[in-house]
Image (spheres, grey):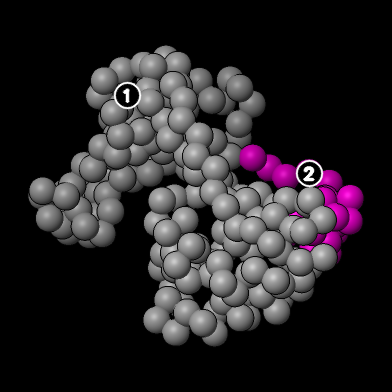
Amino acid sequence: MKIDRVRSLHVSAEWDYHEPLGEAHLSRPESIYPELAGDPSWPVKNVASGPPYHVDAHFLLIDTDEGATGICGPVGDEDIAIINRAFVDILIGEDPQAIERIWDKMYRHSIHGRKGTPMMAQSKVDLALWDLKGKLLNAPVHQLLGGPSRSRIRAYASMLGYSVEPNKVVERTREFLAQGFTAFKWFLPCAPKDGEPGIRKNLAVIRAAR
């Protein structure tokens, strides 16, 4: 069995989501520049327009000459561009189950891409190959990677995009507590550049959640 094609699938749809969306934005490294702070591109670029939201996604597919396909996604436009430019020639003709060999070949090829976006793109290829291997062996990937180490996993609620105003934090936390969540991941609004006032604002979010 050999890899004979690497392709991407573009999916476009309308997301009829009516809960609060994009109420707050992360403080990111570039937020030290006022013109780059509060980037509204998450979770959808047209968040201000209201529902339904237009959503685009790409999926990576790795096909074999025996008809099996591995998939990973959604993946970003940059991932697809890097995979097409840097990795496709390495993948074609390879045994798809030789995952460690393929990973090493991609890594050694990416002399100037061993961190950041190129490494993320390589990870998407790796995920698609593990998906393919699980299908070929008719086994969940976690078994191929060593099997389960526990029977239960505590889930947390990601609060990305929700308002970080303290009264809203209390409201949202109570809503998710009622759904059964016992842990939360709040995204603090201020960065080191915001100094002591920023620390106080972050602490207010934590106090409200507690």
Task: Determine if residue 72 is in view.
Answer: yes
Residue shown at 43%/35% (left/top)? 56
Residue 125 placement, left or right of 75: right
Amino acid on which the number 1 mark rests in the picture: Asn
Magenta stretch, residue numbers = 130-155
Q: Is residue 102 left or right of residue 52?
A: right
- Mark toward the viewer: 2 or 1: 2
The image shows residue 86, relative to residue 198, as above or below, that is below
The N terminus, quarter of image: bottom right
**x and y, in percent, of residue 188 in the image:** 33, 45
Q: Element at badge 1?
A: helix
Residue corresponding to mark 2: 152
Residue 194 occupies quadrant: bottom left
x, y percent for residue 74: 53, 44
Q: Residue 205: horizontal and vertical position, in percent?
A: 34, 38
Q: Which residue sits at x=34%, y=38%?
A: 42
Q: Please, is residue 22 above or below residue 2 in the view?
A: above
SS type, badge 2? loop
Is 141 covered by the magenta stretch? yes
Name the residue tied to disc 1: 167
Q: What is the crowding at mark 1: few (fewer than 14 residues within 10 Å), some, or many (at least 20)?
A: few
Residue 67 sits above or below residue 158 on the image = below
Quarter of the image where one finds residue 196: bottom left
Q: Is residue 48 left or right of residue 65?
A: left
Front residue of this view, candidates 113 and 86: 86
Q: Is residue 147 left or right of residue 126?
A: right
Residue 180 covered by magenta stretch: no
- Do the residues under discs 2 and 1 have CB atoms within 8 angstroms? no
